[in-house]
Image: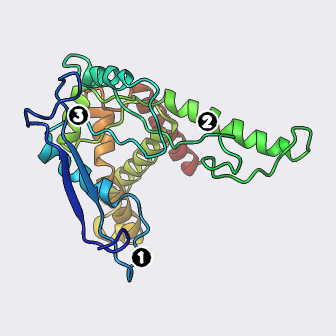
Amino acid sequence: MTSRNHAPIVQILIAGGDQGSVDSDGNALPTLVYMGREKRSQHHHNFKAGAMNALIRASSEMSNSPVILNLDCDMYSNNSESIRDALCFFLDEENGHDIGFVQYPQVFDNITKSDLYDNSVNVITQITSPWFVPFAFVTIGKHVYGLVESLQCAKVSDGDASKRYEQEVMEFGSASSIFVIIASIAMLNLFCLVGGLRRLVVDGGIIGLEPLFIQILLCGLVVAIHLPIYEALFIRKDEGSLPLSVTFLSLGFAILASLLTIV
């Protein structure tokens, strides 16, 4: 058994339930478990997350804790109490369900000589370079577009939204231009289906329908697919339904498209 050739290792260094597991001031210490992934010289195992993933899977059985904290080997917390303060917000019984956590990839510029953490290749080294303009445009556009997206969606789902999600009910709620396009297509196909069926009744049954059979069949399938859209437009009254502005706009666009085909 060597450092590069051994079976998986699991060792409980500190047992949290043991009365003797205390620090120099007599405070109880938490459970400390060491886990090492299996290493074999004949297999390629240069991955660092194996032991961590195993600890995450087993942590609920060992500690029954709702929060898992991972600290990388090259990271350091300047204030250990900040972790406790953050957990107080997340585990708050009244407001904890309204607080979310967003993880961003770590990017540290100019920390080391070789730019260890940034993982980038510096193409533009001077602001006065003419190549700076397109890169600046793309960078600014990316961040501005991200801000627009953040204003159009809710960051925390309320109780009603979670209930609709469990019931497998589609969630709309916002007056987005994407919903207007989808609703307009749904309404246009509904108008086409109604027009085809009207011709079926008025113009002589199946014989008069034969030239339009494929079109009516396709419209019927599209209408069937868009049933949740019609329900969100006209039937549902919850906050997850489509707003009246989307309903009026989709109706207007569908009627306009129908009139253009007639003209």
Image depth: mark 1 or mark 3 in front: 1
Label of residue 162 in the image: 3
Q: Please, what secondary structure does the residue beneath circle 3 have?
A: helix
Label of residue 44 in the image: 1
Q: Residue at x 13, y 45 (%)?
A: 62
Dot 1 amino acid type: His
Residue 208, visible in the rendered structure = no
Q: Is residue 10 above or below residue 169?
A: below
Dot 2 amino acid type: Tyr
Please name whichever residue, 131 or 87, is drawn nearer the observer in this view of the structure: 87
Q: Please, what secondary structure does the residue beneath circle 2 have?
A: helix
Please name whichever residue, 185 or 202, is drawn nearer the observer in this view of the structure: 185
Label 1 with label 3: CB-CB less than 8 Å: no
- Does 150 sit left or right of 87 as displayed? right
> Along the polypeptide, which appears first: circle 1 or circle 2?
1
Q: Is residue 227 above or below residue 239?
A: below
> Along the polypeptide, which appears first: circle 2 or circle 3?
2
Provide the residue designation for mark 2.
145
Q: Position of residue 135 (x, y in %)?
A: 77, 45
The single residue placed furthest to the bottom in the displayed view is 42
The crowd level at tag 3 (other Cα within 10 Å; few <14, some 14-19, many 20+) is few
Q: Quadrant of residue 148?
A: top right
Q: Please, what secondary structure does the residue beneath circle 1 have?
A: loop
Q: Is residue 94 above or below residue 212?
A: above
Q: Residue at x 40, y 59 (%)?
A: 48
- Does 30 sit left or right of 142 as displayed? left
Label 2 with label 3: CB-CB less than 8 Å: no
Q: Position of residue 82 (x, y in %)?
A: 38, 22
The crowd level at tag 2 (other Cα within 10 Å; few <14, some 14-19, many 20+) is few
The crowd level at tag 1 (other Cα within 10 Å; few <14, some 14-19, many 20+) is few
Image depth: mark 1 or mark 2 in front: 1
